[in-house]
């Protein structure tokens, strides 16, 4: 499998999952509630806020040519309208480190976590959210946009309907009554129906708001000093209808993915993020078939799902596709390499059929804080000793780096 000239080979992270000490964010607050959905707090995570130069140099040494990471809104704007010059300069140093080591930075402006004040006023359930997000994007673009190579607005902006149709999140009425949401609202001094954090939000409210936030965010990013491609990233699954589930599967596809892909038609690219498939019966989402192989996340092992999602994204969005996340949570490196090999074969088959696929980013660079599940799932190409913060590249990381350097899977070892 050989890939086109200029193909993007990268890994991806999210600020809250790797930086550590993100104390002004809504996620940090939720992790420390007496009643919480998190099995453990994030703490120092991988301390990438201080160790970014070491990590960037390691990714470049391995052979990657790009790095996708997020800028943390809660650091940039810790209070409404109050922007931190120190935080902006920090991310300038991160961006410069990427350029110094030959990694094209793909920057995500919002990767799930938000400032506490934003969640306390309703997050992406608040009608004013698009303008607030755009204000933040405008400031970042003004100060840092000249260093961007690519940009994503809101990571998986379809997460709320995606998780509800997958039955990971309960219906809207139940979300409003979640104990942690009630407790967080109390701490913030607002009513439970007022507090909201992404993606634990009400589907009936957020869809159009996040799409508007994306549109305004794109305009704000274009107002800055840089000129770079801008897109959204969409959580996608290979959607399969079990007997009698055709109508349910079609509705899930339409509401949780297709309307967002249609909204990407004016963008420069769409980011596809796929880990597995989802089966639907007449009553809704079905669990994996009995005997199906599962990952540490409980996902069905299905690397070839990526081919189906790339094809659907390209057909609906009608813009170039970048695989902005693809990976597996496992402790078995042979298993990880097999998964990535088949995922890349999926990409190659799409390219062979003249689908414009511009890049592949493995999730994630290193073992990190996997949200409510804590540190148990191991997605990383790099292991991190959380006691010492020592990094150690895994076998799949070395192999995928050689693939990236050769722009082909035809590599030794």
Image (cartoon, rainbow, N blue to C red):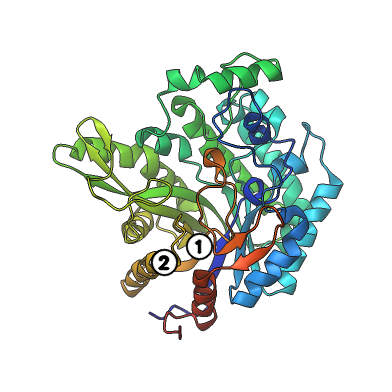
- The x, y position of residue 321, in whole percent, is 44, 61
Q: Residue at x 51, y 20 (%)?
A: 178
Query: Does 56 sit left or right of 383 as displayed?
Result: right
The correct choice, above or below, for 194 with respect to 378 in the image is above
Q: Residue at x 40, y 34 (%)?
A: 168
- The x, y position of residue 404, in whole percent, is 52, 76
Query: Does 280 sit left or right of 173 as displayed?
Result: left
Q: Are marks 2 and 1 in contact (CB under 8 Å)?
A: yes
Q: Label 1: which residue?
A: 362
Q: Which mark is residue 91?
A: none
Query: Does 149 sit left or right of 97 as displayed?
Result: left
Q: Label 2: which residue?
A: 340
The correct choice, above or below, for 295 with respect to 320 in the image is above
Q: Residue at x 75, y 65 (%)?
A: 53
**Residue 412 seen in render:** yes
- The x, y position of residue 405, in whole percent, is 55, 80
Q: Secondary structure at mark 2?
A: helix
Q: Residues within 10 Å of mark 2 (few under 14, many from 20)?
A: some
Q: Residue at x 51, y 83 (%)?
A: 406
Query: Does 390 sit left or right of 214 as displayed?
Result: right
Instruction: Please identify the quadrant where the N terminus is shown.
Output: bottom left
């Amino acid at each position: 499998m050989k890939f086109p000239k200029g193909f993007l080979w990268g890994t991806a992270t999210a600020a809250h999952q790797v930086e550590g000490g993100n104390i002004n964010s809504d996620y940090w607050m939720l992790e420390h509630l007496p009643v919480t959905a998190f099995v453990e707090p994030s703490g120092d995570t991988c301390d990438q806020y201080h160790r970014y130069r070491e990590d960037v140099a390691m990714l470049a040494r391995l052979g990657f040519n790009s790095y996708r990471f997020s800028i943390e809104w809660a650091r940039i704007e810790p209070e409404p309208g109050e922007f931190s010059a120190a935080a902006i300069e920090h991310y300038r140093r991160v961006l410069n480190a990427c350029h110094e080591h030959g990694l094209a930075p793909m920057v995500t402006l919002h990767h799930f976590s938000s400032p506490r004040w934003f969640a306390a006023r309703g997050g992406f359930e608040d009608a004013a959210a698009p303008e607030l997000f755009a204000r933040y994007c405008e400031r970042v673009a003004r100060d840092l946009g000249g260093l961007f190579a690519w940009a994503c607005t809101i990571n998986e902006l379809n997460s709320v309907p995606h998780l509800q149709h997958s039955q990971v999140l309960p219906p809207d009425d139940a979300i409003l009554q979640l104990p942690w949401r009630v407790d967080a609202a109390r701490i913030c001094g607002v009513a439970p129906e007022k507090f909201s954090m992404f993606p634990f939000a009400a589907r009936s409210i957020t869809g159009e708001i996040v799409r508007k936030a994306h549109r305004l965010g794109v305009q704000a990013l274009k107002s800055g000093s840089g000129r770079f491609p801008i897109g959204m990233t969409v959580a996608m699954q290979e959607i399969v209808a079990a007997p009698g589930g055709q109508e349910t599967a079609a509705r899930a596809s339409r509401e949780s993915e297709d309307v967002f892909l249609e909204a990407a038609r004016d963008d420069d690219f769409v980011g596809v993020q796929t880990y597995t498939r989802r089966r639907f019966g007449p009553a809704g989402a079905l669990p994996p078939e009995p005997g199906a192989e599962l990952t540490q996340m409980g996902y069905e092992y299905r690397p070839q799902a990526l081919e189906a999602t790339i094809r659907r994204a390209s057909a609906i969005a009608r813009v170039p596709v970048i695989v902005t996340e693809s990976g597996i949570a496992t402790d078995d490196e042979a298993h990880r390499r097999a998964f990535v090999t088949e995922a890349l074969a999926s990409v190659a088959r799409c390219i062979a059929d003249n689908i414009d696929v511009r890049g592949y980013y493995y999730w994630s660079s290193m073992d990190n804080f996997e949200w409510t599940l804590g540190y148990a799932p191991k997605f990383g190409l790099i292991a991190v000793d959380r006691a010492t913060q020592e990094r150690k590249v895994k076998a799949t990381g070395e192999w995928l780096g050689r693939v990236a350097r050769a722009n082909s899977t035809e590599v030794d070892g």
